[in-house]
Amino acid sequence: MTTSSSDFIVLHGTAVSLVLEADGPGAPLWRHFGARLPDIAPAPGRLRAERFRPTFSLDDDVPFSLFPTFGQGWFGAPALLAHRDGRDFAQAFTPCDWHWIRPGQAVRVTLTDAVAGLTLAIDLDLDPATDVLSTRARLTNSGPTPLDVTWLAAMCLPLPGEAAQVRHMSGRHNGEFALQVDPLGRGTWSRENRRGLTSHDCPPVGVVVLPGATEHAGPAYGAQLAWSGNHAQRIDRIDDGRFQWQMGEWLAPGEGRLPPGATMETPEALATFSPHGLNGVAANFHAAIRARMTWPGGSMAPRPVHLNTWEGVYFKQDPKTLADMATAAAALGVERFVVDDGWFHGRRDDRAGLGDWWVDRDVFPEGLGPLAAHVRGLGMGFALWVEPEMVNPDSELFRAHPDWALQIDGRPHLTARNQLVLDLTRPAVFEHVAGRLFALLRELPIDALKWDHNRDLTAAGSAGRAAWRAQTQAAHRLFDAVREAFPSVEIEACAGGGGRIDAAMLRRAHRVWTSDNLDAVSRVAIQRGFLQFFPPEIMGAHIGAAPAHATGRGQSVDFRAGVAFGGHLGVELDPRALTDAHRDRIAAWIAAYKAARGTLHGGRTWLGEAGDGVVWQAQGAPDDAVVSIFRVEPTGERWAPRVRLPFLDPARDHRIETLGPPPKLDPAQSPFLADLLAGRARIHGAWAREIGLPLPFMKAQTALILRVAAL
Ligand code: DGJ
């Protein structure tokens, strides 16, 4: 039997197609999410008619759908867990309606459960420009009594039965984006985050690969949740051999209570498929994140080089110190001066002051105006660090309003870094914090804010109820309010480094502070994890001191600079203390970054491994890319491996030159390096793809930054 195309919801991307079978009762059935199908490729028949009924099974076949639930007879993980005082615990959405939001691209599926008194709307939007599917669900309690929701999936995605591994991230402060690879099997794979913000150790991201997928080729799926609070994801094997991948908010008890008539909306989940391996998934995500970002002036300006004062002087700020740092920074070529933690009332260390967002007049008797004018006069932008959601018990604010922190009645406060979290769900607190931010932004010529959040949320109680979810929503509203009132101000999102990096934050921020760990060896791995999901131009990447404060391990200034080069470059050390040689070197790297950032930012990113301790990344376009080669470990071989660059055009010859100050490698050791340095290096695309670029001898913890351009 053939079916008419109206029985199916078909969305096509460029290399992705989605097919749902939508003619029966209940949620549409998943028929396909994966490789692009031809425009007209009718399914041979309806799924229930195509497959036989196994023994000891329900008489009505219940295949995997867009929104599987108990009440239909679904034995797998349900998309909804909810009840009404113990009743209406098994939902079955039967009448299903759908209509195009944008024909062939975006659709809304509406489902009703008349028995349980629920309506559900699921939006699916497959953007052909990015091949990323956006999905979210809205559940409305149309019954007469409150409904308690404990799980509402933002995404229920099918994965083929061959799906072999899930690649996801763990980590900690100073060790973000640590790649984990788990096999998929019969058991459930799941990750849950209850830290109240995106988290260092469990960001809501993942990539699932099929056998044979590599960085550059083969089928791979990716998903990430646009949410900055608690979340959960799981992958379960389903009865027909496929897997289902769910993502959504993790709801604390009581957080999902919906009064009659109320609607709960999930965050947006982003899902993609690429036949081009891990780098294909990364390209799709980078494009989708870019499409969601909003820039002052409508488009991204060249990413200015930062000087961040934190590791240079920590809390030891005073007007002369900061002015001299700014002068020294400008001489390096820095374009934005970021005054980090320590400038506000009572903030001499990390034990006091948070909440008192006015300039400390004991330290800055004339305020920060003269410093800002000095910075601006040097031709740099002026940026200020804030941590608006926090309060120290030792602060004027807390003394005046000891009840303004999130707390559980009758239980002690749990401090972290000596601080508590303000209850932004309370209008008075929100208004106060917004008011202080607005006042600062009016009083000072601030071009950018660094917006920090230095603790996880414990005991996130408000008025006796769990408030993780409401706090996350309020934090988003606070960002939105600042963006709306001060649209020319950029925001760098930070949470003790990379604790709040997600697609929802990136609708609001323009840069993220990737990690407090400036050790360039650690940073190679952190940045590679990051780049799987987020684009390089928003990845704060600083040249720090040696030895690195986080690890005690030191690297050459060139390696530190080379590793930071591809991101949004900054310097985080005391520029007054640099030797002449290091000052010249950093200035040369900054000049090279300025010349290359148009190529580094906004194009494709490819990650690759050459083996023997050598990894590489390329940024730009196939005919003009910056290729950063990092030898992280000392060689274990007599000769260096070759670097194969599979993204190059196999039909064209390519010119190669080094970027940055000339590498401190011995040209006598390598004829190739001698050619490179003399501007004579050429390689044919086919040769570079298949046989690879030769490398000079490189010691451990050295970098080679190349421009590879087609002739
Ligand atoms: C944590 C951030 O990651 C650092 O860069 C710095 O801003 C400190 N907080 C300041 O307290």
Image (tube, rainbow, N blue to C red):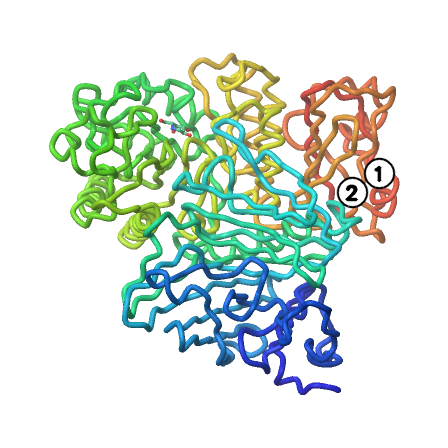
Q: Give the quadrant of residue 397.
A: top left
Q: Is residue 630 above or below residue 243?
A: above
| Disc ID at residue 692 | 1
Q: Position of residue 41 (x, y in %)?
A: 74, 78
**Amino acid type, residue under disc 2 in the picture:** Leu
Q: Position of residue 472 (x, y in %)?
A: 35, 48
Q: Give the quadrant of residue 170.
A: top right
| SS assignment at label 2 | loop
| Disc ID at residue 645 | 2
Residue depicted at 20% across the width and 34% down the height: 410
Residue depicted at 84% across the width and 41% down the height: 683
Q: Is residue 289 above or below residue 110?
A: above
Residue depicted at 67% across the width and 65% down the height: 16
Residues 145 and 422: in front is 145
Ligand 1 placement by image quarter: top left
Q: Which one is earlier in the sequence, the residue at label 1 or at label 2?
A: 2
Circle 2 crowding by C-alpha within 10 Å: few under 14, some 14–19, many from 20? many
Q: Is residue 175 visible?
A: yes
Q: Position of residue 482 (x, y in %)?
A: 29, 49
**Which quarter shows the N terminus?**
bottom right
| Disc ID at residue 594 | none
Residues 612 and 557: in front is 612
Verify CB contact (< 8 Å) between mark 1 and mark 2.
Answer: yes
Q: Give the quadrant of residue 138.
A: bottom left
**Amino acid type, residue under disc 1 in the picture:** Gly
